[in-house]
Amino acid sequence: MKTPQQKFAERLRTAIEKAGYKAEAAVLEREFNQRYYGKGVTLHGVNKWLKGQAIPRLDKIETLAKWLRIPPEELTFGLEIKQQIKEARARWDEGIGYQDREIFEAFLSLPTPQRKIVREVIQTFAKAFPAEGKTSAKSRSD
């Protein structure tokens, strides 16, 4: 199983090549240091990034991502994380109407102790009526 550093190195090398550069330490050092406003990185340092021995700090990842024209989270975590976030948002958005959104907004405006009570009531109903949760509101009211 690959370490997070090794996975980062693969994503970095792929992004560099897609941007039209050679995935070599000398190229990475030169291009990075031209764009980074802090203390520059050494050849040894960028070599560790490319070999999967280290992951740069967030400010350096942001500089790399800007240079390579990819989102920082894609460079850091990969496309699978970005896809999981999109899928979770889509699943959430497709099942909610405006009335449900109003309820969620009202819930979020409650103080923490009242949120806890509402959460417990909803969980109790969900446990008591598991099959009912999958039917539409209209069919329940008939």
Image (spheres, rainbow, N blue to C red):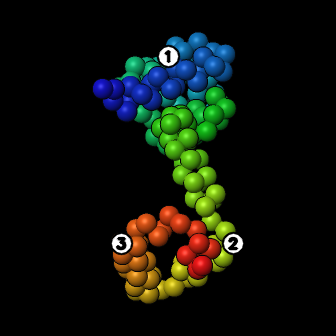
Amino acid type at mark 2 = Tyr
Residue 121 disc label:
none
- Horizontally, residue 23 falls left or right of residue 55, namely right
Image quadrant where one finds the C terminus: bottom right
Q: Give how far apart the Cα atoms at labels 3 and 2 are.
A: 25 Å
Foreground label between 3 and 2: 3
The residue beneath circle 1 is: 25
Dot 3 or dot 2: first in sequence order is 2
Counting from the top left corner in percent of width and height, residue 105 is at: 60, 77
At x 62% / y 74%, what residue is drawn?
Answer: 138
Q: Give how far apart the Cα atoms at labels 2 and 1 are.
A: 53 Å
Q: Give how far apart the Cα atoms at labels 3 and 1 are.
A: 57 Å
Residue 127 disc label:
3
At x 67% / y 16%, what residue is drawn?
Answer: 20
Counting from the top left corner in percent of width and height, residue 87 is at: 56, 47
Query: Looking at the picture, does residue 94 appear above or below residue 27?
Result: below
The residue beneath circle 2 is: 98
Counting from the top left corner in percent of width and height, residue 123 is at: 39, 74
Number of other residues with Cα within 10 Å of mark 3, as a class: few under 14, some 14 to 19, many 20 or more = few
Counting from the top left corner in percent of width and height, residue 119 is at: 42, 78
Dot 2 or dot 1: first in sequence order is 1
At x 57% / y 54%, what residue is drawn?
Answer: 91
At x 48% / y 68%, what residue is drawn?
Answer: 133
Q: How many marks?
A: 3
Number of other residues with Cα within 10 Å of mark 1, as a class: few under 14, some 14 to 19, many 20 or more = some
Amino acid type at mark 1 = Ala
- Horizontally, residue 79 falls left or right of residue 4, namely right
Helix, strand or loop at mark 2:
helix
Helix, strand or loop at mark 1:
helix
